[in-house]
Amino acid sequence: MTSYKRITLRIAAAVLLLTGLSTPCRGETAVDSLTYAVYPYLPDAGYYQELIEQRWAEIEPDIRLVRAEWDCYEDGVPEGIDVIMYDAEGRDRLIGAGWLQPIDPSRIQEIDDIYPFALEGLTVDGKLYGIPVFLCGNFLIYDISCGILAGAEHLTDLAGESELLAISSDDKLNRKQFIFEILADIWGEPHPPVEGGAEEMLALIDELAIDEYQQGNSAQLAAAYDAGVGSGYINFSESMRFLEERISQTDIKAISFSDRDNLPLLYVDAVSVTAGVEGPRYEKCVELMNVIAEADVLRSLSVQDGRPRYLLLARRSPYAALAEEYPLYHRLEALASDDNNRVIVIP
């Protein structure tokens, strides 16, 4: 072999070696897109995605966001989805299935703006599984001219009344929630030790419920109340977005589901990176999580087409600006910032 050929082969081998060394390993390939899913039961998930994608384009214009659908209650493994949003109610089930990755708290932007109880509710064995975004709970929404509701602190304060409230007490999912909250208030613990003992309070709820709406959804309950049916209803804060005629005379508060002190239990919707995501892709996912939970994005989401959505947010800062224009946000802030709040987690 001539010296020329030897030199040529050595150069070719060196090029191949350098090429091999520069080839990214698994998890280190360039990131050109991320797939994400938001909580599907938001008042307008599509509008939320628009806001997320607008903000993301300002930060990472070269990385495309791909929308996905994933329901934390019904769907299986979120295969092919990088970032998901889940209800902390199923926290232990999702972690046990190995579907969620923890995040270092130092990676969360403006973490002090997030209510501590929400972070605690996402923490298992010292690991934080996601960023809290939304809160939700069963509240008494009522006409302030109704003295009995305005003064009530416990459902038992309403004993003797009938067909006072629009409550979907016959809906299987809602009844399960009511039982959980009744027992939590009776025992003063977020994880009550027994299953029985809610029958008396359930009977009272059924007495207070207006018969035609015992199977109603949020929109139907709110619409009925707005049309003058009953003096209030029990539902999530975001249901107030349906109110028009009665909104100016409506208030919202927590109420005990027993004759004992109320233990405010809230659902928390959080955003998390899925298992198997690593390297630069994981880093970009953390960046996306912060956008999804960003205060400015949540503030924008809270008003659509000039109408408030009355979402309960896991961050403190958006409330002040929202309350300037929509005073009921002062009440929502008080509900979210209660020092006694606990996150609903069902084993």
Image (spheres, helix red, strand yellow):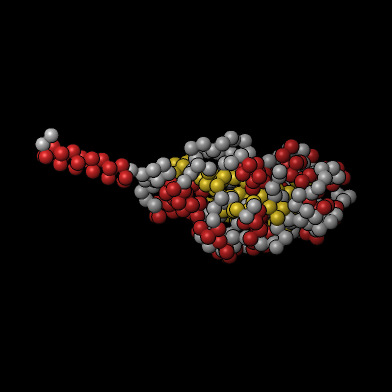
Where is residue 234? Give x, y as percent: 73, 49
152 left or right, relative to 303: right
User: Is residue 138 among what the camera can see?
Assistant: yes
Residue displayed at 68% across by 59% down: 335
Of residue 24 and residue 331, the one placed in the foreground of this image is 24
How many marks the image carries: the answer is: 0
Where is residue 2? Give x, y as percent: 10, 36
295 left or right, relative to 346: left
Most extreme residue toward the right, as rendered? Answer: 160
The answer to whether 4 is drawn above or below residue 153 in the figure is: above
Residue displayed at 63% across by 60% down: 116
54 left or right, relative to 230: left
Where is residue 295? Give x, y as percent: 53, 59
Of residue 32 and residue 174, the one placed in the foreground of this image is 32
Residue displayed at 63% across by 39% down: 73
Residue displayed at 49% across by 47% down: 49
Q: Quadrant of the N terminus?
A: top left
Q: Quadrant of the C terminus?
A: top right
Where is residue 71? Give x, y as percent: 58, 39
User: Is residue 118 among what the camera can see?
Assistant: no
